[in-house]
Amino acid sequence: MVDSDMGRLWWRRTPQPAAAGSPAWRGTAVFGAVAGVLGAGLMHIIPGPPRGPVVPPAAPSPPAAVRTVAVFQRIVLPDLAVIDPAGVSSADVRRIAKAPGVRQALPLDGAQIYMGSQWVSVIGVNAQLYRSWTSLSTASNEGLWNGLAAGGFMATPAAQHRLRLHTGSTYPVTGASTVDLPYAGAASLGIKGIDMVVAARDSAELGLVHHVAVLISAPGLSIAKLKREVRAAVGHGPELVTLRAQSPATQPAGFSTNKRPVTYFQLFQASAAMYCPGLPWTVLAAIGQIESGDRNNPGVSSAGAMGPMQFLPSTWARWGTVAFGEKGPPNIMDPYDAIPSAARYLCAAGGATAAGLPKAIFAYNHADWYVAEVLALARAYAHDFG
């Protein structure tokens, strides 16, 4: 994880209503974990008088029936963030998404607002989409995302302690207006200086700055090339922050089913080593980045493929694997199960040898363009991280 603090505070004295628009997507969908920073100092403050002491939480409601409302569709490994305290314009977001080499661009709303008498730095997101950009441990927590998508909020462990938050209780949050939000729980957000995450529908009501940042995934480009393309799209006003992870260890360091990987890179490496010796881990990483359904489909594929490695349920029924100490039956939405299962499937199709690898990738998704794209991206990963 790359953390960086720009250390500047931008003040804004009048609320600016935010629109909770959909993020811009381009080309094939990709996968990954947010590793970086939007910068605590680049958040506008939504002014308003402190509301006094933190209001005692309302009693938790009885637990509802468990259902998935924020499906984990894919993994996205972020490379760059564009940050503008006044908000990135919709036209600039579209230009970013269309820049050569950009696979996905995810705008985020954000501001500093009140909870009780304390300032908190908040981002507003589409839970269904933002989940794919978060860290491995956060993205795997089904309950948190269900709670966020249902209109709750999540916070960092430090913010939970500072604000004395209790999971399941409801708290008033004050920006341009006051909104009562249930607390879904604590999670590592991977974004230094951010205390809380709210859903997009609450972002507009709280008056968060619309599109204060845009996360970008462009795994086939060097950072220097990506920055040139983004500068050409947005000019020299916004701040550009590198999020691409540093080179991971190329060996899985003896991971076993009793020791969970803590990063996606470790999970790709360990899954290849344990479930298909000979399969390059970079191929798993590339498949994780490229949607295995319709290349322009940002959701569940037109064929019905699901989860971070885009398995068809019928294929999952045969190849789904419980790995790395997970509990219960194989979960198509859990990367700890899905990535080892992809390694097993590729191995059975011949992916453990160089000669058999293209056929194995074709078996994963019957398209020549897909085979070429996976192999090209795997070579890029081997160059960057090998």
Image: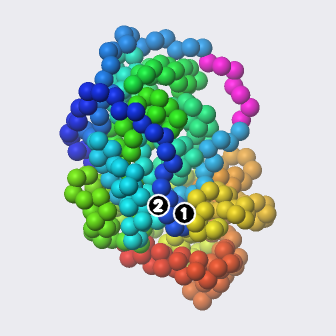
Q: Percent from the top left, x then y, of residue 252?
A: 49, 64
Q: Which residue is at 36% across, 65% downward?
A: 247
Instruction: Please give the label number shown on residue 104.
Output: 2
Q: Which residues are magenta?
A: 60-66
Give the crowd class for mark 2: few <14, some 14-19, many >=20 residues within 10 Å.
many
Residue extending farthest to the front is 91
Assign the C terminus to one quadrant of the image.
Answer: bottom left
Q: Amino acid at mark 2?
A: Gln
| On screen, residue 117 above or below 111 | above
Image marks 2 and 1: residues in contact by CB distance under 8 Å? yes
Position of 256 with respect to 90 (left or right) is right
136 in magenta: no
Instruction: Please give the label number shown on residue 29.
Output: 1
Q: Percent from the top left, x then y, of residue 359?
A: 65, 84
Colouring used for the render: rainbow
Position of 106 with respect to 361 (left or right) is left
